[in-house]
Structure formats: C-alpha cells, structure tokens
Image (spheres, rainbow, N blue to C red):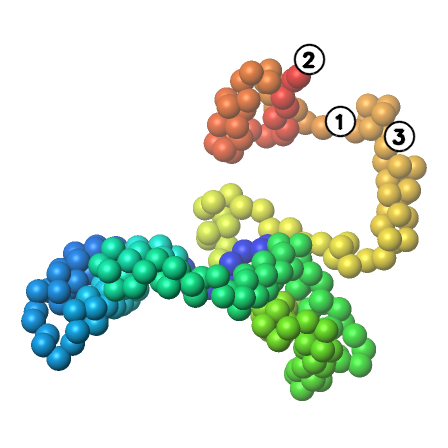
Amino acid sequence: MNFDANRPFGPVMSEAEARFERIRRAAGLVLAPVLFLTTLAIPMESLQPGQHRLLAVLVLIVTLWMTEALPLALTGVLAPVMMILLGVVPAAQAFAPYADPIMFLFIGAFVLARGIQIHGLDRRFAYAVLKHPIVGSSPSRIMFAYGLVCLVISMWISNTAAVAMMFPIGLAIIAMLGGAKASVNLNEILRRRLTVSGSTLRPRPVSFKGAIARSLRDKVWPHIESGAIKPVIYRIFPLAEAAHAHLLMESSEHIGKIVLSVG
C-alpha cells in the first residue's frame, strides 16, 4: 500500500493538548504586555536608560516566543520595531541584521529545499538510493551513500544550501527504512469512506508504461467506442450548478459519476 508522501509527518494533537495550546497562547497575550510594562516600571539604577528599555523588550519578546501568542515571524519582526519606538537604537541599526548576506543565503537554501520537497525530488532520490544493488537494505551502506552524496554536493554549493537540500532527502530515506508494512485503522477508513490504493507504475520505465498504453488502446478502447463498456453516470449537472454537484459528491450518496455539462 502506498500512502500520500506529501502528508506532513508528526503526531496529531489530542483535545487536551489542543486546549493547552489555546490556554498557553491566550496567557501569552496577557503576560507579555504585563511583564513588559512591569519591567519598564521597576527602577534599575545599575542599568542605563537604553539598557533598561532593551531589557523590557527582551522580556516581551521571550514571553511571546515561549507562549507563541503571536506567529514566530511576527514576533521576530516585533523586536526591532519595539527597539526603534523606545529609542534604544536607530532604525538603520535595528534592521541591519535583516540585510546581512547570510540571511539571503539561508532564504535561498530554504527555497531550494522546499522546491525539492514540492516536486518530489527527495523521494525520488531516496528510492534511487534504496533500490541500488550496492546499497541494498544495509543501514550502514545507506548512511555511507547518503554521506557521500552530501560530500559531493557540498563541494559545489555552500554547506548551508547542501544541508537544506539533503535534510528532506534524509527524512525520506528514514521513512523508507521503516519497510513496506504499515498498520491501518480500518474503522477510520470505513467511517470516513476513504479509499486506499496502491501503485508501482511510477518507478517503471517508459517502455513498460508505453506497452500498457498500447494494450489499453488495442484491447479496451474498442469496447468503450462500441458501447460495450459504459461508465455509470449518476447525474448530470449544468456548469452553473457546479456547487450543487460538489455538495452531492461530498455527501457520498451517489453511485457512479457526477458529470458537469458545458454545452
């Protein structure tokens, strides 16, 4: 059986965990400004005024960061904004680190890694490594092959880009090492009326796929043209009623095809 490889890995939160996350974020929205104002109000003679205000900003940002009351990206941008508003540093100095060349290096590496994941290059690479006869199923040989590829790639691009590119490939290899067997909750499949399908056609050569297409054209398509094989059509909707067709499809009450007529 094959499962959707694009599905994100990770445990699903229980109701109790989700409730805790909501409480944590709500508490952060309250605690962060309270601690910020409290830190500003407490006299600290050992610190200069600018240092005192910077400490208040640090307390605000750390609280928001730990509670995730705001998105982390927004929290990261809030730090220089608050330092500018409180007069800790000028705007040019506060935002200077965001224009550092290393930041653009990281952004480019992450964009490259995300593109590899979207187009499935990481899974293709993992399949190619695992099915090679020299590598086989030996974990030690797989790790050696993976390290060798990292070595070769890092000779031509930066180490940061190489890590960002090879990280999803490493995750895909680890996932493939789990084997071809998986446990399936049949109750969930039946309750949600899901369909589990499997296919080994994608890794086959083009010649094999072409033979299937020719066999389909010669042996199956004539029966469809003659009417011996007909699709089961449940209902035909005009294009203007596409929303109703979609609702019918979601209800799972139909047996056969739902067709939209554009004529």
Amino acid residing under circle 3:
Pro
**Residue 200 image point, x, y percent:** 74, 57
Q: Are marks 2 and 1 in contact (CB under 8 Å)?
A: no
Label 1: which residue?
230
Q: Is residue 229 visible?
A: yes
**Which circle's residue, 2 or 1, is located before the other in the chain?**
1
* Label 3 Cα neighbours within 10 Å, binned few <14 / some 14-19 / many ≥20: few
Amino acid residing under circle 1:
Lys
Foreground of the two, 14 or 98: 98
Residue 162 placement: quadrant: bottom right
**Residue 152 image point, x, y percent:** 73, 78
**Residue 225 image point, x, y percent:** 85, 25
* Label 1 Cα neighbours within 10 Å, binned few <14 / some 14-19 / many ≥20: few
Q: In the picture provided, is 27 more to the left or to the right than 216?
A: left
**Which circle's residue, 3 or 2, is located before the other in the chain?**
3
Label 2: which residue?
263
Residue 158 placement: quadrant: bottom right
State which quarter of the image contains the C terminus: top right
Foreground of the two, 227 or 3: 3
Label 3: which residue?
222
Q: Are marks 3 and 1 in contact (CB under 8 Å)?
A: no
Element under label 1?
Answer: loop
Q: CA distance from mark 3 to mark 1?
A: 12 Å
Which residue is at a point 89% across and 30% down the rendered structure image?
222
Which residue is at a point 58% across and 47% down the rendered structure image?
195
Element under label 2?
Answer: loop
State which quarter of the image contains the N terminus: bottom right
Q: Nearer the viewer, mark 3 or mark 2?
A: 2
Amino acid residing under circle 2:
Gly
* Rendered view: 255 above or below 99: above
